[in-house]
Image (spheres, coloured by chain):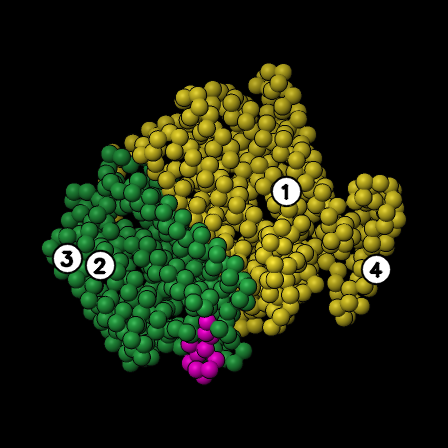
Amino acid sequence: MEEVLLARWQFAITTVYHFLFVPLTLGLSVLVAVMETMYVRTGNETYKTMTKFWGKLFLVNFIMGVVTGIVQEFHFGMNWAEYSRFMGDIFGAPLALEALSAFFLESTFLGLWIFGWDRLSKKMHAACIWLVAFGSNLSAFWILVANSFMQSPVGYALRNGRAEMTDFIQVITNPYVWGQFPHTVLGGLVTAGVFVTAISAYYLLKKRHLPVFKPSIKIGLACMLVSTLLVMGTGHLQAQFLAVKQPMKMAAMEALWESADPAPFAIAVVVDEKNKKNSFEIGVPGALSFLAYDKFSGEIKGINELQAAAEKKYGPGNYTPNITQSFWTFRIMVLSGLWMMFVAALGAFFFYKKQLEENPFILKLLLWSLPFPYIANSTGWILTEGGRQPWIVVGLQKVSEGVSTNVTSTEIWISMIGFTVLYGVLAAVAVYLVRKFIIIGPLDEKPVLSVLTKKKEATLWN
Amino acid sequence: MELNVLWFILVGVLFTGFFFLEGFDYGVGMLLPFIGKNDVERRIVINTIGPFWDGNEVWMITAGGALFAAFPHVYATMFSGFYMALFLMLVALILRGVAIEFRSKDESSEWRSTWDWMIFIGSTLPALLWGVAVTNLIQGIPINSKMQYAGTFFDLLSPYTLVGGIAFLLVFLFHGALFLTLRVEGELIERSRKAAVKIGLVAAVVFLSLVGLTYTNTDLFKSALASSALWGAVAVFVAGYVLLWLKRFGWAFAMSGLAIAFTTIAFFSGLFPRIMVSSINPAWSLTIHNAASSAYTLKIMSFAALALVPIVLAYQGWTYWVFRKRVTAKELEY
């Protein structure tokens, strides 16, 4: 089934790419709203400059999230038509609600925010960006409701050859989503915190625009510190929930082949997927049981036992996700998170001591931490979605059953190459623009005016 | 009213809103390189839709979401069946979205004209493809007994559907030119008016051919509502053209919008109760019953839609009120 593999790759490429931009949208919309609120409250023009500068970077990022989001919505029907037939009754509802309640809100009020500086009162204008922030985060809620059903189905019945919704309240109060949603929103705030901190650190290093970037780095560091702590906390609760609800994902991310009580936490392993064991492993005895149950005992089911149980329940087949991938993506995510928490604490300490500006080493550390939220976000989702394999909806439909039956591999190849090339070019353009805006710095709109006067040569049609 | 019918109407409303609003966005995008003769003018043209286009595009996303939620089989069959067409549409929409956002963010003229052409392509292709798609739905496409599309990309292209595509494109162009007459100033008004006068004539001819071919190629005229809506569309289109001659631009724009709305209503009521017609066997068509979600889901979604759609209409309407003034060179803040 070449189509299944290709469709999976395409979905993975689009999703990971889409999710490079989304977390920053989620978090930075909030931070820009905070900055503008400070401007409205104090009347201090510095906050307006900050709002405009970070707002400009926000917009470049936002549009990338929007255009790749459309691909996401279309993908379900294009490549995963059988999934859409099977799940439409449940999955379509949160998607439609996302569009109705969140996409309209964020897109409309963002238009008002971009063009409304002179047409709306200050308070009204600030309210617009708050509504954008609310809309973005609300959209995250709806799509995670949909995703959570795929991880842990609730409130449904199997009827008419498909999953039908029987209880909408259960679907939106799925405990899984209440683990995922805070973790995702906080991940967005971490991303925005690191983004603002790292870029502000760049200016402090260059000693440029200090009045703008000293308050910026304060907001960035505060956001980073609080949200890294909370993202760790929510992640921990989510993992505890996994131990009960998705034991296979839990076993996979710990590369735990045999059930154990108490279970050790592996620090590093070399997985031998063929022989279903680890050829090398070092770990902390009992630590996994402690993480899962808050005590140094308690059984964690192993992959081999879970595989046997699944075969008994669903018939012969491979019910084990990719162990190496699950194990390492989890560790990379956690380590990135720990690193960000560490540098946030370090930065906050020196900021508090009023020594941050004079400490190029710490500033460089903050600047070079910029990739980490992106690494953590991507590995987190690869773990979540990869750990669900071979299921597209856990226990109800396999990935191989969800793919479109009438789409050929040639068609998928064409669209996959097309999208990937396009994504690559656009990423380069977005990075170019963000870099350019950072180099220019938070100037007023003057460059635009110079363009207005000299523009005869831009003409094509006279 | 039966909820399946309600949802058919809601999807129809969403597509009507989408074609009405994105119709002028696409039109403006297609006209951009021709109406805007220098950079300032192009920025004015783009800013006429600047605050609106993204919100307008959400009508399409919502229509897609509504199809998924209410008629999942239609969503699945259509999106997998129109695979290559949708791939092209997505590429176009991606380019258009980033182009509108990026074009003014760098000063070089190559940069700006490149993105301007992306806006042009990104507006032309979807306008054309939507016309092809809508006419395919009613003419019928090879859908087999398992609700699967059994054709290829090229089976979607026939003289009728191509005329449909070009008709949509031209009507959107006309609609966009009229929108511009209301939103720009000075010389640009005259240029938009002239463009509308020329395009309107061609659009009228192609639109009439679409009506004729619809009569020969589909069963749309069997529905009294559909045929009166389609003739109504012809009538208001002509009225719009006359009003344009009289330089009553506001009314002319209202008429081109009504023509788009009536056309959408005509195609939807011509389809009813089918949503996708099977050309192999009429019994294999996807209908509001065999393609629908469960009664429970439809009920939940009905409450949600009836609560949310009025709110959306209210704040989107307010946006047009806030930006009711013409876009001028002096106020190009963006």
Given residues B225 and A243, the one toward you in this image is B225
Per the rendering, the colour in which chain A appears is: yellow
Residue drawn 44% across and 23% down?
A41
Same-chain status of marks 4 and 3: no
* Amino acid type of the residue tagged 4 in the rendering: Glu
Q: Which residue is mark 3?
A: B243
Query: Which badge, 1 or 4, comes first in the chain's sequence?
Result: 1
Given the image, what chain letter belongs to the residue carrying mark 1? A
Q: Which residue is mark 2?
A: B255
What secondary structure is found at the residue carrying circle 2?
helix
Q: Do callouts 1 and 4 mark residues in contact (Cβ within 8 Å)?
A: no
For residue B141, which quarter of the picture?
bottom left
Cα gap from disc 3 to disc 2, whole angstroms: 9 Å
Task: Give neighbour class at mark 1: few <14, some 14-19, many 20+ (Cα, 10 Å).
Answer: many
Given residues B269 and A320, the one toward you in this image is B269
Given the image, what chain letter belongs to the residue carrying mark 2? B
Q: Is residue A11 at all visible to an observer of this figure?
A: yes
Per the rendering, the colour in which chain B appears is: green
B278 magenta-colored: yes
A260 magenta-colored: no
Cα gap from disc 2 to disc 4, whole angstroms: 69 Å
Marking on residue B32: none
Q: Which residues are magenta?
A: B277-288
What secondary structure is found at the residue carrying circle 3?
helix
* Amino acid type of the residue tagged 1 in the rendering: His
Question: Foreground mark, 2 or 4?
Answer: 2
